Amino acid sequence: MSGAFLAGLVAGYGVAIPVGAIAILILGLSARTSFRVGAAAALAVATADGLYAAVAALGGAGLADVIAPAAGPLRVAAAVVLLGLAGHGLWRTWSAHRSQLPPTTRTGQGMGTPARAYAALLGLTLLNPTTVLYFTALVLGRRDTADPGAVPVALFVAGVFLASASWQLLIAGGGTVVGRALTGPRGRLVTGLVSSALIAALAVVALLPG
């Protein structure tokens, strides 16, 4: 059971660490309004990640008996998908680093309260199809998170939520000083490389015999 929770933590950090438009938006909200607004936006992102992880885990549990005969090839396919996501993230990180384009975002005048910030960021994050693809590939690649028991699924989702929430809250609480460091060229390069490395490591784990 602890393995499912740790898998959720690693998966959550893998999807949360890259500093992109959502992270920049959280930083802008926190700097322009207050930490409460930034924290609400951060928790909205973590909620979306948790929902996607739950959908993937529950779907994987429901298909466990059906796909059992093809478990080996499916683990290989899952590893390929995860490696593709890692490679795509690495390519985007390196391309953005080489272009040296300054990040741009609009902080939105309609998100000045915690409730509005939460609703807006939840909707924006749920529109990202890469997240559900990432979690689905990961669940199919791991036997413990595809366990039909409710406890492993809950632990996996809890790990994803806590990892995502802790990272997004760190960004929200960093203020303008840490915000400049993370969203600068060097910070974006480092976070992108770390995320790609985590996802690639998860692909290797998916190939290991369970």
Image (cartoon, rainbow, N blue to C red):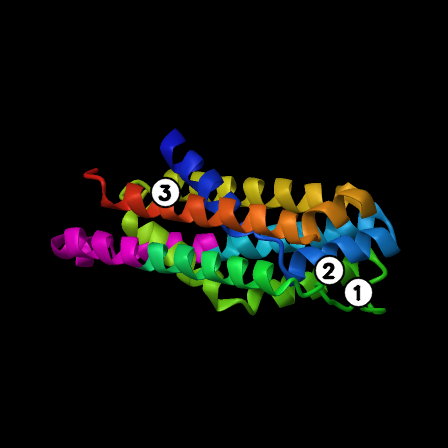
Q: Is residue 184 left or right of residue 18?
A: right
Q: Which residue is mark 2?
A: 25
Instruction: Residue 88 in the image: state x and y as whole percent.
Output: 43, 62
Q: Residue under label 1, please give it.
A: 107
Measuring from the top left, give residue 73's x and y in whole percent: 16, 56
Task: Name the residue rendered at 76%, 53% in the picture.
Answer: 27
Please state which amino acid type lies under the numbered disc 2: Leu
Q: Dot 2: within a 10 Å radius of its alpha carbon, few (fewer than 14), some, or many (20 or more) residues?
A: many
Residue to which mark 3 is pinned: 201
What amino acid is found at the position of numbered circle 1 in the picture? Thr
Q: Secondary structure at mark 3?
A: helix
Q: Are marks 1 and 2 in contact (CB under 8 Å)?
A: yes
Earlier in the chain: of badge 3 and badge 1, it is 1
Say if the magenta span includes residue 56: yes
Quote the CA–CA distance across marks 1 and 2. 6 Å
Specify start and end residues of the magenta stretch as a single range.
Answer: 53-80
Residue 111, percent across and down?
A: 81, 64
Residue in the picture at 46% in, 64% down: 130
- Give the side of residue 191 with respect to residue 141, left or right: right
Check contact, mark 3 vs mark 1: CB within 8 A. Answer: no
